[in-house]
Image (cartoon, rainbow, N blue to C red):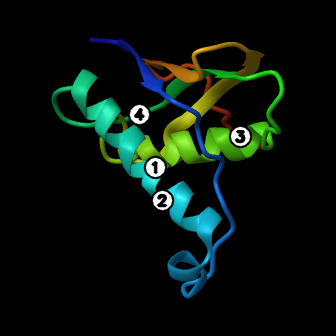
Amino acid sequence: MNEISFTIPGRPIPAARMTRRGKWVKRQAQKYLAFKEFAGWEARKHFKGEPWQGPVGVEIRIYLKVNRTRGDGDNYMKSLLDSMNGIIFEDDSQVVEGHFHILDGEPQRTEVRVWKLNGKGLITRETP
């Protein structure tokens, strides 16, 4: 398997800035942590086996209601990548290609596609 796709139902929660104490008392931090766990379980439903090693690419399509406020795209991406750590890939530092789209749409959901890059996409530095 070189690619996986799955859908996370519901409105995604963008990553929140947290302190050690803040994750227990700030409501947004608690919502983010609950979403991250939920998204991780959705990833586990569709991905069996050991986490991939090596470079990967990710495409995330987020569908939100038109009349709602939305967070920053990079914070959505961060929360979704964090949720897949240790499940689909070892660590989100393996993501060397990423695309995200925030679209108007119902039902609210997040469509995720992850693929192996087989060494492609890595930035390497040539030595003089």
* Residue 18, percent from left and from top: 63, 73
Mark 4 and mark 1 lie on one chain; the one further toward the N terminus is 1
Mark 2 and mark 4 lie on one chain; the one further toward the N terminus is 2
Asked which secondary structure carries label 2, the reply is helix
Mark 3 and mark 4 lie on one chain; the one further toward the N terminus is 4
**Three-letter code for the amino acid on which mark 2 is drawn:** Leu
Mark 3 and mark 1 lie on one chain; the one further toward the N terminus is 1
Horizontal arrangement in the rendering, residue 85 relative to residue 25 (left or right) = left
Q: Which residue is mark 1?
A: 36
Task: Locate residue 15: give its quadrant.
Answer: bottom right
- Badge 3: residue crowd in 10 Å (few <14, some 14–19, many ≥20): few
**Three-letter code for the amino acid on which mark 1 is drawn:** Lys
Q: Which residue is mark 4?
A: 54
Task: Locate residue 19: give its quadrant.
Answer: bottom right
Mark 3 and mark 2 lie on one chain; the one further toward the N terminus is 2
- Badge 4: residue crowd in 10 Å (few <14, some 14–19, many ≥20): some
Q: Residue furthest left?
A: 49
Label of residue 125 in the image: 3
Q: Mark 3 or 4, which is nearer the eye?
A: 4
Q: Are marks 3 and 1 in contact (CB under 8 Å)?
A: no
Please tell me which residue lies in front, 101 or 68: 68
How far apart are labels 3 and 1 at the CA level? 34 Å
